[in-house]
Image: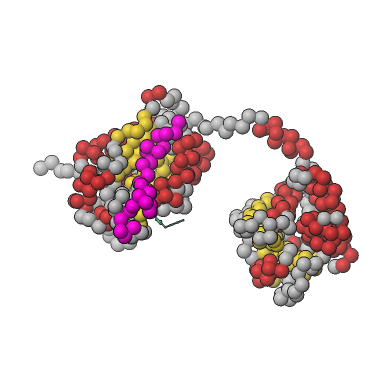
Amino acid sequence: MPKEIYAKAESFYVDFERKTGPDKISTHYCPGCGHGNLHKMIAETLDEFGVRDKTIFVWPVGCSVFGYYYFHTGNVQVAHGRAPAVATGIKRAHPDSIVLVYQGDGDLAGIGGNEILQAANRGENITVFFVNNAIYGMTGGQMAPTTLPGMKTTTTPLGRTRENEGLPIRVVELLSALEAPTYLERVSLTDAKQMNRARRAVRKAIQAQVEGKGFTLVEALAPCPTGWKIAPTDSRDWIHEQMEPLFPLGAKKDVLEHVESIPGEPRPFVADGMGEKLDILASSVTQARKGTLKEEDYANPRIKVAGFGGQGILLLGVAFSECGMQAGYEVSWLPSYGPEMRGGTANCHVRISDPKIGSPMVEESDVLIAMNRPSLEKFEPDVRPGGLLLLDSSLIDIEPQRDDVTILKIPATKIADDIGTTKCANMVMMGAYIERTGILDLESVIEALPSYIKRKKTIPMNQQAIAKGAEYVREHF
Ligand SMILES: Cc1ncc(C[n+]2csc(CCOP(=O)(O)OP(=O)(O)O)c2C)c(N)n1
Ligand code: SF4
């Protein structure tokens, strides 16, 4: 008797290690789910083109989040809706790779609606597989942008209505209005005939990327028996009867034959005159120098600057990082904006470091610069024992609680007023901090100011403010 040998595509792992126990064959998908069929078509196509080892999948949030357990390729799993943006970065950094984006309808058309639009519009050389099952599967069946009119979901218990939720979004039709995409087709994962069409579309889309032919997307109408609460066998009929009339099958755009093939070509970053502008900028920047640290403990500070909008809190963070960068440090600046431009709260996290910076977040700080009372109350507990706390004593009328940190009370607003403008209180604090720690060279910082202050006529006052802040520390501490 001839022996039948069944083998998985080589682009799949031999064992699916996700589950503990003896079952290394099954996926996590529900019986009758469309994801598995589409996975198989993609894996077989990767085998056919021999590109498995240079393929990088970008997986979404949704039922297909675990795709990386199955594909023996490069795999990245990203935040909800962000796959096209991440894929853009990967493809531009590695133009020789085959970058596949895999997204559900909630992920692609809901939370990531703008991401896909922009990536398609830029004509990124990536291939997108869009699984349209008309529902949020993973989270238990909420309405998706592609949910059918009248369809009952957990968030539309009486059925989706045009008046309340609008009509379903037809993604391939929407994207076909753009100039850049080269191939956009809708298929359905139902009977044998449609499966064959789907396989051809998957192949065509991947081939387009192998040949460097721009942005392609295949939308697959896919069964979700669990979300729809119908039997797997009935779900295929449901697609034919309910989905296909609303989401017509076929290619909505196909210009692949007319597109020039540029496989693996790096996508040039077009920036006419940019190099020249950067040179001019660089030559106008004064090189700030590292200072002489007054205590080893002041090295590599994690700084938090906080106050209210309008005090130049974020600019002070920029000033630190700009000067730190010019002095050859690694720097980071992470702003946090309150909703109001003036009068709301503002804070930023700054790091100035000799070693590379792992994260720009400053949770525990070495230095807190508090420019108003709420900032002191909020962030004082986060200063590390032995850290530095600089506060604007002209505005803060309470005593700090901590007795295990060094406290420098600087009447920054008063000093700034004496110079002629309250607005340079932030620079007074900068001078005070630099004088205390010696992390940067004071003179160089004063000279570097024109490189990041836009309003030229304010430069002399700001320079004076830095000097005055330093002077205050010299005289009082
Ligand atoms: C930022 C964020 N918002 C919401 C969620 C919750 N969430 C997880 S999966 C999902 C919907 C996924 O639906 P879809 O993209 O249609 O994929 P499916 O599960 O149907 O394959 C949502 C809303 C999340 N994980 N992250
Ligand atoms: S909930 Fe739906 S999409 Fe998710 S695995 Fe089950 S059938 Fe597939």
Q: How many labels, in total? A: 0
Q: How is the image coloured?
A: secondary structure
Q: Is residue 218 magenta?
A: no
Q: Quadrant of residue 207?
A: top left
**Residue drawn 37% across and 35% down?**
184
Which residue is outermost to the left?
1
Which residue is outermost to the front?
163
**Residue drawn 40% across and 38% down?**
174
Q: Is residue 81 left or right of residue 312?
A: left
Residue 134: horizontal and vertical position, in percent? 32, 50
**Residue 97, visible in the rendered structure:** no
Residue 366: horizontal and vertical position, in percent? 70, 64
294 vs 382, nearest the viewer: 382
Up/down of 120 relative to 235, above or below: above
Q: Is residue 157 magenta?
A: yes
**Residue drawn 51% across and 37% down?**
92
Q: Is residue 357 left or right of residue 201?
A: right
Please identify the quadrant where the C terminus is shown.
bottom right
Which residue is outermost to the right?
475
Residue 271: horizontal and vertical position, in percent? 61, 32
Magenta part of the chain = 156-179
Q: Is residue 284 left or right of residue 35?
A: right
**Residue drawn 36% across and 59% down?**
155
Q: Quadrant of residue 349?
A: bottom right
77 vs 115, nearest the viewer: 115
Up/down of 476 relative to 214, above or below: below
Please identify the quadrant where the N terminus is shown.
top left
Residue 438: horizontal and vertical position, in percent? 80, 58
**Residue 330, visible in the rendered structure:** yes
